[in-house]
Amino acid sequence: MAILVTGGAGYIGSHTCVELLNAGHEIVVLDNFINSNPESLNRISEITGCMFKTYSIDLLDKEKVDQVFEENDIEAVIHFAGLKAVGESLSIPLHYYHNNITGTVVLCEVMKRHNVKKLVFSSSATVYGIPKQCPISEEFPLSALNPYGRTKLMIEEILRDLYVSDNAWSIALLRYFNPIGAHKSGLIGEDPNGIPNNLMPYITQVAVGKLKELSVFGNQYPTKDGTGIRDYIHVVDLAVGHLRALDKVSNSTGIDAFNLGTGKGYSVLEMVEAFEKASLKKVHYKIVDERHGDAAVSYADPLKAKQELGWVAEKSIEEMCEDSWKWQMKNPNGYKNRIVDEENLHKVNSGDFFILN
Ligand code: NAD
Ligand code: UFG
């Protein structure tokens, strides 16, 4: 029996694959590499010493997704595949709706056809919009500020409808706060395309000399130093959260949302300082205007995940910064330094899937 990991080559997916393999699960990865590099899959194998099947296909291709279920004994799905850039979603909303929402509908249709009804879905703290207060608990009102956020909100609703229609489903909606950090080995990490949108990859690229300075978006928020506060969570803690959610969906039916965060908030300037300490590098910055649509403060109440999944985030902000830095130093150009070559991949069935060797 295997766990299908959609988007398994991406940032959070690759870390989750490592934890799944280390825990003894068999996995099958499905990714179209629209925002990732197959080299991440080689690195997963390097870290774990495990081989696994990967399908290089698009989730929108129903026939091919169906074939994955025909060829493998899938027991549950962890669904990461999706586009995630807020700014881009404002320019190409239809593409985001099609990719994220239709992709999820296709996946669920195929799952249903194969009687696989256990699903862990990557939602986001973005579904809380601008929260009225913090910490944020799962019962807070939901809203969306941009097309990306709306895809997450709509998918949550679609999955609720699916459960209402058939109570045999078991679905965990994981609302991530701000994942940063990387695997201890420095072999896998976040590899953004072009100029990063998010704080930590921007900071690491300034520290490594690829970018000149960080623009801090506003210092007049009602916070301790005026800059925005977020709940940063180590990506490995987040990955482990998926294993706990998998246990939950494997042993019960229902649909439930869980915050995956630490419950602690750090300001942008605190993050700069923590990173400078961990890297011994100066991070130059300037204060600029606030970014439209940014909340002043966002951090989780993670109690529900503790009580119902038996999961808590364990890693400190220091460790998050050290691991982000290690990844950046070892891979100044992300995965692009070691482009995957044909010899690295043992192709089977003319590209239908490949096994890493
Ligand atoms: P990522 O872009 O690194 O990974 C997503 C993966 O999905 C990529 O490998 C991409 O190639 C693949 N993909 C996208 N569309 C696909 C399609 N149609 N068919 C097949 N593969 C497809 O992103 P990530 O940071 O690992 O995020 C994973 C999930 O978590 C996403 O759904 C994202 O929206 C959600 N999320 C991320 C964050 C964050 O800050 N990173 C926060 C909250 C939620
Ligand atoms: N920030 C800067 N400068 C930058 C980038 C960010 O000052 O160059 C600030 C932001 O204003 C914010 C904080 O750093 O106060 C964090 O910003 P990120 O862009 O890293 O993260 P967000 O909280 O804005 O959003 C992220 C993802 C969303 C996701 C959300 C919750 O981008 O997709 O976390 O999980 F929905």
Image (cartoon, rainbow, N blue to C red):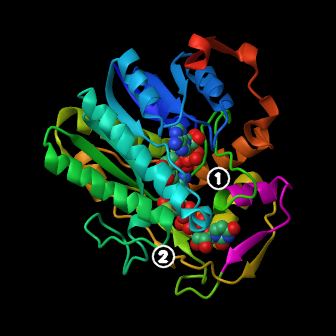
202 part of magenta stretch = yes
Q: Quadrant of the N terminus?
A: top left
Residue at image mark 2: 297
Report the residue at 46% width, 71% height from top.
Answer: 298
Give the amino acid type for the residue marked by disc 2 in the picture.
Answer: Val
User: Which callout, 2 or 1, points to the residue nearer the camera?
Assistant: 2
Tag shown at residue 332: none
Q: Give coordinates of residue 257: x percent, y percent.
A: 28, 55
> Which is nearer the N-term, disc 2 or disc 1?
2
Circle 2: element type? strand
Q: Is residue 244 above or below residue 340?
A: below
Tell me if mark 2 has few (under 14), some (14-19) or many (20+) residues whose alpha carbon lies within 10 angstroms of its own.
many
Residue at image mark 1: 321
Range of residues picked out in magenta: 201-217
208 part of magenta stretch = yes
Q: Is residue 210 above or below residue 295?
A: above
When asked about the image quadrant of residue 227, the answer is bottom right
Q: Quadrant of the C terminus?
A: top right
Q: Give coordinates of residue 23: x percent, y percent.
A: 41, 24
Report the residue at 74% width, 55% height from top.
Answer: 204
Q: Is residue 182 left or right of residue 27?
A: right
Q: Is residue 349 visible?
A: yes
Give the CA distance from mark 2 to mark 1: 20 Å
Q: Ligand 2 lies in which image quarter?
A: bottom right
